[in-house]
Image: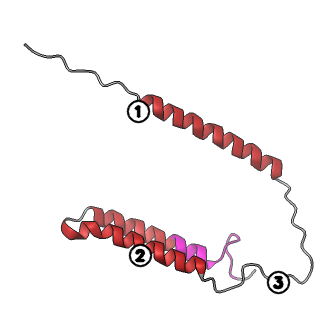
């Protein structure tokens, strides 16, 4: 497939660049004062609209027409599910540790002075 880098086309890089610029602009606008501070919402909504337009109206066909029949073989099926199970367990364990150490941390009362 022509025009691809790492198996993806230019549209992925355009979307990534758009969202990096939007994130940078939102961080800069959050530090502003007055009405400029509230324009973060409009910047974010504009980025969502541009992203949805770029995703819903593609220029090329999604799947190129193959000249020969292509068989897709999933050789890493079991390994992918083992990795998914490991990451799920790690995520749940991390969530539990955040719950214990940050959310349920006791707040001690200050002694009253007479």
Residue 7: x %, y % from top left: 71, 71
What residue did someone put label 1 on? 102
Check contact, mark 1 vs mark 3: CB within 8 A.
no
Q: Is residue 56 left or right of residue 30?
A: right
Residue at horizontal 72%, vertical 83%?
61
Q: Is residue 31 left or right of residue 101?
A: left
Mark number, residue 31: none
Residue at horizontal 54%, vertical 36%?
94
What residue did someone put label 2 on? 46
Instruction: Please check the rendered image and state whether residue 5 is part of the magenta-colored stretch, yes or no.
Output: yes
For mark 1, does the 10 Å Cα neighbourhood hold few (<14), some (14 to 19), or many (20 or more) residues? few
Residue 41 falls in image quadrant: bottom left
For mark 2, does the 10 Å Cα neighbourhood hold few (<14), some (14 to 19), or many (20 or more) residues? few
Instruction: Please check the rendered image and state whether residue 104 is part of the magenta-colored stretch, yes or no.
Output: no
What residue did someone put label 3 on? 65
Residue at horizontal 38%, vertical 27%?
105
> Is the residue 34 above or below the residue 104 in the image?
below
> Is the residue 24 above or below the residue 53 in the image?
above
Q: In this view, does 20 lie to the left or right of 56?
A: left
| Residue farthest to the left, as pictured | 114
Q: Distance between the residues labelled 2 and 3?
A: 34 Å
Q: Which of marks 2 and 3 is nearer the N terminus?
A: 2
For mark 3, does the 10 Å Cα neighbourhood hold few (<14), some (14 to 19), or many (20 or more) residues? few
Residue 66: x %, y % from top left: 86, 81
Q: State which region is magenta.
A: 3-16
Secondary structure at badge 3 equals loop
Secondary structure at badge 2 equals helix
């Amino acid at each position: 497939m022509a025009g691809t880098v790492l198996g993806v086309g230019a549209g992925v890089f355009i979307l990534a660049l758009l969202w990096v610029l939007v994130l940078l602009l939102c961080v800069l606008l959050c530090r502003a004062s007055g009405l400029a501070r509230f324009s973060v919402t409009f910047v974010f909504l504009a980025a969502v609209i541009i992203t949805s337009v770029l995703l819903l109206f593609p220029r090329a066909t999604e799947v190129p027409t193959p000249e020969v029949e292509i068989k897709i073989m999933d050789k890493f099926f079991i390994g992918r599910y083992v990795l998914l199970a490991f990451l799920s367990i790690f995520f749940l364990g991390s969530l539990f540790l955040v719950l214990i150490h940050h959310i349920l941390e006791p707040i001690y009362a200050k002694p009253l002075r007479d």
